[in-house]
């Protein structure tokens, strides 16, 4: 059997996965004492994890950054919730809908390390972060700072706020290979003036996977009286951290990314100092000024997806956040270390382990990212996404817990073959 057939067969294994039980639940005691760095390299274990997924065998999926396919136990749980909500109909919506949502927020707060009084469930990072950008009490002439590498939807919202309220936007550029945390902090610090009110920064830059020194940026900004909003779209469920340790003012994330919650689920953290000053997207009925639920009027939406947050967290906890982080970082370093020194290949992600985790970006000199992505798919059946803006020209590579090193070998061979041609 050649490598490609082997991988196709691996995908099909997942079709036979059990309905609700995870393939790894029976492994809990066996892996309990195995050091994370050892388990991260244990392909036999990660093959078991893969059996919890139903994967399309037509291509190798190295684009988990947009949406994480959810494991079968979470998917089945969501389907059961959809059936239950449909069975109870308006009765469900008028009785326990809100207390269930509060319970989900409490469970989520434990994962991200903060009190549930500061967390609401939103539909995605776009909603969370745009609520802050749009709801900030701007005055004409106020300034905002963010980066060229930030996500488009947020940059566009800052443009709209500029048009609407006369806010001045200062755009900096994050280097792909900083020499130190201080270099990054200094770049943001230089853009701050006495008029700056809000700074937006990515916890992980989505196009490169670069993890930024958030706490140091927050401390620097606070000394200058500037609030910090963190775009953590790619961080919850990807690597471990506590929001409270970051000392930020606002934090937004998408749960349908690395926490593998069904589509349309997000998180917004607001430091208690700011709950009363933010304007909600949709106004809420009688709430106290410091009650975060005043920011959480969404209208009717797929509540069964919210209910699956609990199941996704149970799955995440069973796998273990630290184990998942170690595996994702191992996978990234497994492939990127094999191409970093190639004269025709450029890795746009820092080499230091603490500055990246599962995501990295790679380009081939003299080949447009769009062509690289197309050739990877057409000639090697590897699905990625092309990035071609700011200082990043390459494909974003985002493997997942179901990715095997066998697949990354196919990817590395493909890159080298194209770069050597
Ligand atoms: C850095 C970053 N911020 C925000 C978002 C928006 O996430 P969503 O579409 O889930 O709102 C993304 C999406 O990929 C992202 O990468």
Image (cartoon, rainbow, N blue to C red):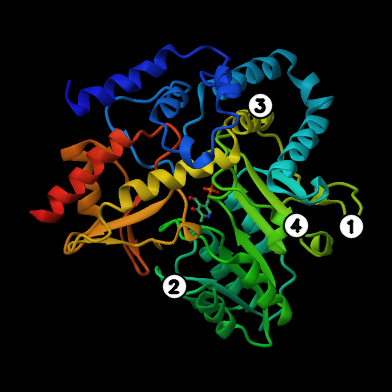
Q: CA distance from mark 1 to mark 2?
A: 41 Å
Residue at 67%, 17% (x, y): give it. 86
Return the mark for residue 178: 2
Mark 1 or 3, nearer chain start: 1
Q: Which mark is residue 390?
A: none
The spot of residue 56 in percent (x, y) is 34, 25
> Who is closer to the viewer here, 30 or 117?
30
Q: Secondary structure at mark 3?
A: helix
Residue holding disc 3: 304
Q: Which residue is mark 1?
A: 289
Q: In the image, which is nearer the foreground, mark 2 or mark 4?
A: 2
Report which quarter residue 317 is drawn in.
Answer: top right
- Position of residue 50 relative to residue 220, above or below, is above
Task: Say which residue appears at 60% left-offset and 35% top-offset.
Answer: 320
Question: Mark 2 falls on what kind of element?
Answer: loop
Q: Quadrant of the N terminus?
A: top left
Where is 149 relative to 299, above or below? Answer: below
Q: Is residue 398 in view from this perspective?
A: no
Asked whether 128 or 59 is in front, the reply is 59
Given this view, does label 3 or label 2 mark the residue nearer the observer? 2
Q: Residue at x 38, y 61 (%)?
A: 349
Q: Earlier in the sequence, mark 3 or mark 4?
A: 4
Bin the neighbour count of mark 3 within 10 Å (Cα to Cα): few under 14, some 14-19, many 20 and up. many
The residue that label 4 is drawn on is 270
Q: Position of residue 228 (x, y in %)?
A: 67, 68
Neighbour class for label 4 at 10 Å: few (<14), some, many (≥20)?
many
């Amino acid at each position: 059997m050649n490598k490609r057939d082997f991988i196709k067969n691996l995908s099909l294994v997942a079709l036979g996965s059990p309905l609700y039980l995870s393939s790894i639940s029976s492994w809990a005691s066996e892996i309990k004492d195995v050091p994370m760095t050892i388990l991260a390299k244990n392909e036999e274990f990660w093959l078991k994890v893969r059996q919890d997924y139903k994967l399309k065998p037509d291509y190798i999926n190295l684009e988990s950054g947009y949406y994480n396919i959810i494991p079968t136990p979470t998917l089945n749980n969501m389907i059961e919730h959809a059936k239950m909500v449909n069975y109870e109909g308006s009765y469900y919506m008028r009785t326990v809908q809100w207390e269930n949502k509060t319970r989900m927020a409490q469970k989520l707060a434990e994962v991200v390390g903060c009190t549930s009084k500061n967390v609401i469930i939103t539909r995605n990072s776009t909603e969370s972060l745009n609520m802050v950008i749009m709801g900030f009490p701007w005055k004409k002439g106020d300034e905002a700072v963010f980066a060229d590498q930030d996500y488009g939807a947020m940059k566009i919202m800052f443009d709209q706020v500029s048009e609407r309220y006369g806010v001045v936007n200062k755009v900096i550029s994050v280097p792909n290979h900083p020499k130190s945390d201080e270099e990054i902090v200094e770049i943001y610090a230089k853009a701050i003036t006495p008029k700056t009110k809000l700074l937006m920064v990515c916890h992980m830059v989505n196009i490169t996977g670069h993890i930024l020194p958030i706490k140091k940026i927050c401390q620097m900004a606070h000394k200058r009286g500037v609030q910090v909003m963190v775009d953590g779209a790619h961080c919850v469920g990807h690597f471990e951290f506590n929001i409270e340790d970051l000392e930020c003012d606002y934090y937004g994330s998408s749960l349908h990314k690395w926490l593998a919650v069904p589509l349309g689920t997000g998180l917004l953290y607001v430091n208690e100092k700011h709950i009363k000053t933010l304007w909600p997207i949709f106004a809420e009925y009688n709430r106290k000024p410091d009650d975060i639920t005043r920011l959480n009027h969404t209208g009717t939406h797929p509540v069964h997806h919210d209910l699956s947050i609990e199941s996704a967290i149970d799955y995440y906890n069973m796998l273990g956040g630290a184990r998942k982080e170690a595996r994702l970082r191992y996978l990234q370093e497994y492939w990127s270390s094999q191409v970093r020194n190639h004269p025709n290949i450029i890795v746009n992600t820092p080499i230091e382990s603490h500055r990246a985790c599962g995501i990295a970006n790679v380009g081939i000199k003299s080949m447009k990212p769009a062509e690289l992505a197309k050739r990877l798919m057409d000639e090697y059946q590897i699905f990625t996404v092309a990035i071609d803006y700011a200082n990043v020209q390459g494909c974003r590579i985002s493997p997942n817990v179901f990715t095997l090193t066998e697949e990354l070998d196919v990817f590395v061979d493909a890159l080298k073959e194209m770069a050597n041609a």
